[in-house]
Amino acid sequence: MNIIKFIESFTNEGMINSLANKGSRRDSLLQFQKMGSTAAMAAVPLGLAALLTPNKANASITAFFGPTATPTSALQLALTLEYLEDEFYDIALSTAGLIPTADRDIIAQISKHENAHVAFLKSALGADAPAKPTFDFTGAKSVNGGGPFDAFGDYPTFLALSQAFEDTGVRAYKGQAGNLISNGDLLTAALQIHSVEAMHASQIRRLRGQKGWIVGNDRGGLPVQAQAVYNGEENAIQAGFNTSGVNGIPAGAGPESFDEPITGDEAVTIASLFIVG
Amino acid sequence: MKKVKVEEVRSNLQNRRNFLKISGLTIAGAGLIMAGCSSDDDGGSKPDNQLPGVRNGIFDLGGGDLGILTYAYALEQLEADFYTRVVNGNNFGNVFNSEEQAVLTDLYRHEVIHREFFKTAISGVITSQDQLLPNLQFDYGQLNFSSRDQVLGTAKTLEDTGVAAYNGAGRYITSANYLLIAGKIVSIEARHASAIRSLLNPGSGDFAGDDVVTVANGLGQAKKPSQIITAVSGLGVIKTAFSAQFLP
């Protein structure tokens, strides 16, 4: 996928707005907003490119999800992703005729966890908790004039989005672990949520007829917009060890046996497809 | 390096020794007893004194990051050994349906890779081969590898244990690189646990059941190494004695 086109296809203005009133980086965020909405829209490709490049302009925003992120910013990212998942499953469960009876207990269990994660993270963040963004699960940010996904009218599409969200969640939490290394309690809690997201991901994947684990960078029949969720998962080298080179084991099992992280920026890019305000 | 609370460690160690006595001691070769007993008479808090190696006749997993890696290596040895026996069982193709065979075969492959990864990673940082945990010996006693319920039930226990172990160990890892590696593996263990659980009770919430995910906060299990080692020792499967004096 053309990364520039991808970047141009959304803005995370809504997220920035919602964080502006709460975060400790209020001043720089307000400055960003002062460009005015028109100017901000026009500047989106450049602005986002800056966000996605840690060493370039607007360091304070970059720092929000970048390599120098703090435990607070790590949890803020986590809460944003949990908001997304929680609302997604809430809508699904209240949409008559979407979820087959046979799968209802599964989706309800996941929804229960996401709801608890939101409450847990809001409590942990206190005044630093960002407000819930406005979501559009059709992926309205990916095209002009409405999104491509019939998220709540077509069960296979719902499951596909669910898989993308859960696999993204696993990768995003993993990517934030290092930012929590200084706080054992928060790190442990994040790891505990991370493992639950992985349990969800495995179950949803299996409902879709996929393996519970990611095969190479295969997006498993998901739309092309989801490829960013799986890029990099094909990595076979762990701390210099070739996981595809173990005697008697097929090479493909190597990348399957280790999940890969994504950065905060990458997680925001994926989530922003569904954030409209 | 974590400072060890001597009292707590001693009482835990005593409990563990009782467990380990029950499970027997099969590899106390003279070479192993001789190795690794460098001077540990100056407080026991210095990294050099917490290296993995034989102490008091049995292998100690050591402390610090290397201790955690060695602890993970021990757990991965157990998982890999179990699934190796499962997929090589005489009735594997009859006892399990095709979906179950596919899952168990993948788990076998993943856990063997994890084991070999840790062996290589640890070998790359230790200064003496005596610091590498030997190949542990296992005996599953009465476990019937031709029983679907027993095999899947044991798999569930092992995968749940793996998740809780990695989740609980993360905070004791000081290297961000090792922490990331642990994170890359724990989510695979969680994916495994979910798959095994769904094979046992499809269409239910058991894939991430209330027994392993706390309802109130949605958190999965996290257990200290000492808790995990006690639980694993209680299975009576590991026949090679080892200790973990320097792990929390």
Image (spheres, rainbow, N blue to C red):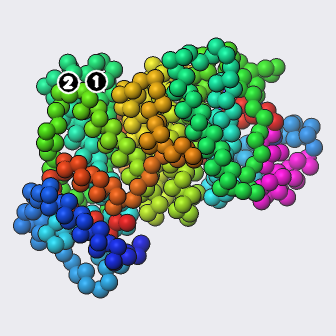
Q: Is residue A26 magenta?
A: yes
Q: Residue furthest bottom?
A: B42
Residue at x-position 35% and y-position 41%: B159
Do we see residue A171 in this rendering?
no
Tag 2 and tag 1, C-beta contact below 8 Å? yes
Q: Residue furthest left?
A: B30
Examine the rendered structure and indicate whether residue B209 appears above or below residue A162: below
Q: Which residue is mark 1?
A: B101
Q: Chain of mark 1?
A: B
Q: Using the rendered image, report if marks 2 and 1 lie on a common chain.
A: yes
Q: Position of residue B238 (x, y in %)?
A: 19, 51
Q: Nearer the viewer, residue B130 or B215?
A: B215
Give the magenta part as a residue range: A14-35
In-image side of A168 versus B113 (left or right): right
Residue at x-position 18% and y-position 60%: B20
Res A74 label: none
Residue at x-position 56% and y-position 27%: A107
In-image side of B1 versus B245 (left or right): right
Give neighbour class at mark 1: few <14, some 14-19, many 20+ (Cα, 10 Å).
Answer: some
Residue at x-position 16% and y-position 66%: B58
Q: Which residue is mark 2?
A: B92
Specify the amino acid type for callout 2: Phe
